Amino acid sequence: MVTLDEVLGSGLLQKPSGDAPEALQRQITNYKPLQTFQLEKTRPYQQQYADIYFLRLTKIRPAVEAAASAAWEGTVLGGEKVKKVERVLDVRQGELCWVAGTVYMDMPLKPSILEDVSKDRWISAPTSVGHYYSGNVDDSIMLEDDSGRIRLVGNALQNHFMVTGCIVAVMGTENANGEFEVIDLLFAELPPQPERWSLSKGKKEDSEDIEMMDASFSGHPSKPPSKKIAIVSGLEFSNADTPYAMELNLLLEYLLGEALDPSTQRDELSHITRLIIAGNSISTTAAEHTKPAAAFDTTTPTNKFAPPNQHKKYGYDSSSYNPIPSQLFDNFLSELLPTMPVTLLPGALDPANASYPQQPIHPAMFPQSRTYMSPPKVGVGKDRDVPEEEEPGWFDNVTNPWEGEIEGWRVLGTGGQNLDDVFKYVESEDRLGMMEAMCRWRCVAPTAPDTLWSYPFQEDEPFVIKECPHLFFVGCQPEFGTKVTHGPDGQAVRLIAVPSFSETREVVLVDTETLDVERVKIVAE
Amino acid sequence: MEDYKTYLAENVLSEDKVVTYRLLSRALRVHPNVAKQMLYDFHKTQSTKKPGSVYATYLLYGIQKSVQHQNGNAMDIDLPSSLPDADPVDDDEVPSYTLALVQEDRLADVLKDYETISSIHVYSVGPHPAKDLTLLVDAAQSALAIKDDTKKPRPRTIVNSHVRRRERRGPGLKAAAPAPVKQESKAKAAPTKTAPAKPAPAPAPAAAPAKSKEESKFATPATEPEAPAAATKKPAPSLKRNTSAASGIMQAFSKAASLPKKAKTSEKSTPAAEDTPVALSDDGEDDDDVPLPKPGAASSRKSRKEREEELRRMMEDDEDEDMEEKADSPAPEEEEEEPVVEEPPAKAEAAKEEEKEIVTTTGDGRRRGKRRVMKKKQIMDDQGYLVTIQEPAWESFSEDEAPPASKQKPKVASSAPPAAAGKAKKSAPKGQGNIMSFFSKK
């Protein structure tokens, strides 16, 4: 409870005193992006998608099998000892066994390429289905590997999130119907977690001192406020008159540190060291709404030669391009960049490729801000050896998903499509649980390439999480959520579901020492 | 230090504007925190002098009471976790701050909902209660519009000494500012424009009068009903293209209007839009005198509907024009001498002979125009035989298309400097042609 009298006459609510305040210095954090999801500029698209599943299975199966043999080795059920079976096809009826493989969900509501081909539909539009999960018996869960496929049944399946593409080990028996009765089920669990500062070793020494100091003084009131990074998603700049234009302004002022009073600026705002934009910065949907359906009913007499639909002539109509959203976004960034570095992940609405992993938004979209980006990689010859040590851009436009190291912590983030797609497979609303499950599956986008559009990888499957992140955030979610999940080997992952700013007007702050999370809600009435 | 009072009095009281602390800070080049205090002081003195004359909005930052706090957090806890091994206890309380913009009159009420307020200051001062946030947004935008000047950098609250910008490498990065592009095209277009504006009567006056004349021409009611609208509303698909696109319309209007009437007078006396169907073609003259839309201004944008409408009209009127031209095919060579058509002055007598090619645009580096070609046409005669006849027709072209020499005889009549310059580029590989040539009658 705060009363008006308390606040009056304090801080900035008084006459200007005349002495110009000094400018504060913004803190910085160590930042090292990884190129895990970067694709070649000249990449072929002719390959088959099967390689992704094969690579994923070969990469994750050892971990799953290790976990399974640790758990099930020597287990005796009903007088029968559990045996390991190498391939799905080797499962024999009535034998108690366990086998590892890839899950495939067969759901009638799921878009199916086979159906499209058989019905001669060659244009694949994004699916509009909200949920593939229908809850009826038609949904079935299969386990497959390169040998074959078997249908999984049993109550044990109900306790877990199951989506296409995750690698599991199941224990049970094949029943008379040829189905596999699952008694128990295991995932790969969290991958090994690198030490903090594993990538940027040089910084380790000085920071350890601080860390120790922090640890010994934890809870002490005089502890210096630690540095933070801000994560926001779904800014969805559309038009000058968006209903939340004021909130966007306030967000900018907040991040710039121009808002609020000197003590807050000193203790909080100047400690925000980086802004991560996790997808959906630009929205063109507002422009779509203005598209009139019956615009051509009132054709003027001069149009007598033109059939009503002639405007849809050939391909891209450049006059329908709306430059305003990207201009607004560019303005926003160019205001912010002089005082704060920005990492930009593309999202579903952004002008990047639609398939995972999304490549960085082209610098041409940012005529003003792009001078803060790292210079374009020119030739192939001389510069080839340089990139390893090249400094990341102050304005770093990165891939989605993106992996990097911030202040020593391994960070993995996505623009949200992977979680949204997993969400469609399951009945639950527990998005944090799904994020946790992704870590346990060791796959950041298990549903690619089945229902999440993806590049047909041939040599590598980058979606497999090889090293457990310390911080895993997913942008463009309907609401905020966070928790810490722990792995069997002492791994700890801070999960954050970053809400869309356009929906919730919220920005998330993460402490770079403790990985604690704060949220800031911006309200303009 | 006291000039802020005059500034605020002027803007808020006299001009009815809303002034935010950022606007004040940037306009007077004072530190934002000082600007906040200035706003407060101004608001206080004005309110004591005359209550209700100015209204303030406040920006609060603090923690709201736990009712909402719980609400925000409850979702994470309430949801049934279907993972048995999930760690439900770990979901610690997440501190949630609120940054709120509050009207003066609601301040006391809103404050009651807060547990702590860590910061409060005046955000803006305006002559009316800020019912509509758009006024504040406008004020914020106008604050952004005040650019830094290098001599007196605007004070910032937080600076970052580590900021890096990339080095400019080569000329490729010049486009960072859209302005130079426009300048460039203007400069290029200027020399080609001096003569054509003045046809026969006065031999080549200075560039400036010609330009202004054209300007006035376009300002006359001649093209009034549609042309200005078209020009100003024409969206800017790309900043660079814009000039030629908009001017192309203007030019086409005037030309087509004069075509059927065989008016040899300049359009100044021709009420162009009065009767004929407006003909639009793509052979745009790079005319900078046309009132150009500001690419950035939201107000000048027109709705999608209008744009589509216009585009469609442009297409089919282009066909119209072609048909008209075919109907009176001998006429064009005279008509094309119309002032709008760009032609080097040296060609005054060359125009007597058949005009084979008219280059109308060189401005954006691409040559567009019309050329006269012989077209084969197959018709069925009254006895049912197919007869192939050749007839002259006009075809619009752009530089990217293969040079006409490949198919027809080289019919290049214009040897003027700008045209020649364009010709050199003409050997560019056949890439994407001008789409309008697709629609023209072949």
Image (cartoon, coloured by chain):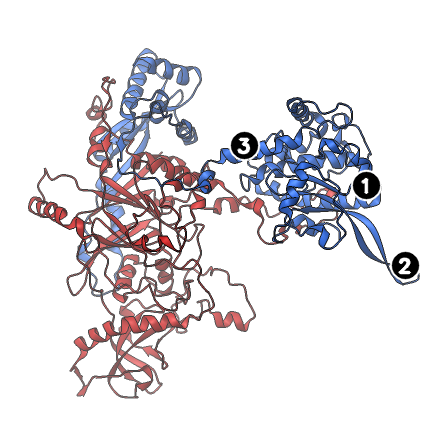
Chain colours: A red, B blue
Q: Secondary structure at mark 3?
A: helix
Depth-wise, is mark 2 or mark 3 nearer the camera? 3
Residue A295 shows up from this direction: no
From the top left corner, tell me how far across and down residue A225 is, in percent. 16, 39
Residue A419, given in percent of the width and then of the height, sits at 34, 59
Identify residue for label 3: B183
Q: For the residue marked with disc 1, what is the amino acid?
A: Glu
The residue pinned by badge 1 equals B354
Q: CA distance from mark 3 to mark 1?
A: 35 Å
The quarter of the image holding the N terminus of chain B is: top left
Residue at 33% in and 51% down: A475
Disc 3 residue type? Gln
- Please state which amino acid type lies under the numbered disc 2: Asp
Q: Mark on residue A222?
A: none
Question: Could one spot residue A498 in this view of the protein?
Answer: yes
* Chain of residue at mark 3: B
In this rendering, the answer to whether A177 lies above or below B215 is below
Which element carries disc 1, helix, strand or loop? loop
Residue B238, picture quadrant: top right
Q: Earlier in the sequence, mark 3 or mark 1?
A: 3
B140 or A504, which lies in front?
Answer: B140
Query: Going by the image, does A266 lie left or right of B259?
Result: left
